[in-house]
Amino acid sequence: MYDNFECVDVKLADGIAWVRLNRPEKRNAMSPQLHEEMEAALTTLEVDPEAKVVVVAGAGGNFSAGQDLKLFFRANENNPLGRKKAQRAANRWRWELLYNYDKPTIAMVEGYCVGGAFMQLLATDFAVAAEDATFSLSEVNWGILPGALVSKVVADTVLPRHALYYCCLGEPFDGKEAERIGMVNFAVPPTKVEDKVTELANKLMAKSPRVLRATKQAVRNVRSMDFGQSYDYLAEKGMAIKVGDTEDSYNTGLSQFLDEKSYKPTFEPFKLGSDEEKGN
Ligand code: COA
């Protein structure tokens, strides 16, 4: 199912889909073909029951050197249709798709994460970086601004001083700094990155998928709502969780705590039952 891609490598193991941009000789710079293939891979994985958590990473020790300056920019300078199609495909998977993804997503950053790669970095739900990874909002250094949604998503993620500093200076920063300013959740030694991502994925897989999906959607969506809208939306969203919840998560959770006394919600999730087999 995932073997016919040239620029994307997909491996499934123990519920985790490892999706790697696969142009290592170009530091995983993103070509129009790569964008089309990422959209196809992520769309398929969204309905693949084998994939419970999706990890977005890069092959050959680099996350991505951003848009391919030759194939995405220069080759389309006099080709408005080609440019438009490439932009649309790029934005669809890096933002519309990942930001609204039904399953939990984690960015795993090793090596370079430059320019346009901040879109997929910040569209994923969580991010783990190697301490020695190199981040750079390089656009200002070659005559453009952080486009598509890069300026917006950086400004939405970190404090304004950090966003202005790194967008305007185009200075590289490492994984530890990315963690300090809130660009990633964790920076770990390079040899521990996959382990940390796996640990996080396993924690996510222990939750009710339906409750987790609703929770991440809620946290994202309330950011642009006022208090009144948030009360209303969260109440309705809370009701919606119960529709089709084969785990009966609310009652199961209460019963395991109050009646069976088999777990404490402060520290861990309730024990999942049959929900996974039913594909929810
Ligand atoms: N677009 C097109 N090609 C790229 C690229 C990009 N964004 N990033 C790297 N490459 C290509 C290089 O041209 C080179 O190709 P070649 O072997 O045919 O000459 C190959 O990938 C290796 O790159 P190189 O610069 O030799 O590797 P490096 O490890 O010394 O440096 C980077 C890596 C990422 C620091 C450097 O390539 C770079 O600054 N790239 C531009 C990143 C950028 O500004 N992206 C923003 C796009 S929005």
Image (tube, grey):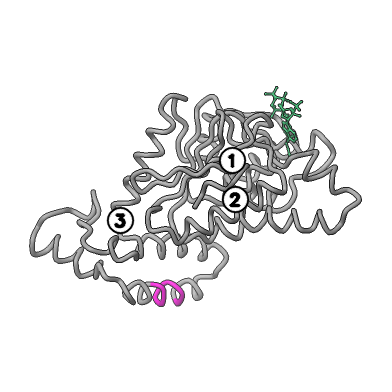
Left/right of residue 190 with respect to residue 248 in the rendered view: right
| Discs 3, 2 touching: Cβ within 8 Å | no
Three-letter amino acid code of the residue under disc 3: Lys
Q: Nearer the viewer, mark 3 or mark 2?
A: 2
- Is disc 1 surrounded by few (<14), some (14 to 19) or many (20+) residues within 10 Å? many
Magenta region: 232-237
| Residue for point 11% across, 55% down | 262
Query: In front here: 50 or 98?
Result: 50
Q: Position of residue 115 (x, y in %)?
A: 70, 40
- Quadrant assignment for the C terminus: bottom left
Quarter of image, ligand 1 = top right
- Specify the amino acid type for callout 1: Leu
Residue highlighted by disc 1: 21
Residue of label 2: 38
- From the viewer's perspective, tell me whether residue 26 is left or right of residue 225: right
According to the picture, the residue beneath numbered tag 3 turns out to be 207
Q: Using the numbered discs, state the Cα–Cα distance from disc 2 to disc 1 in whole angstroms.
A: 8 Å
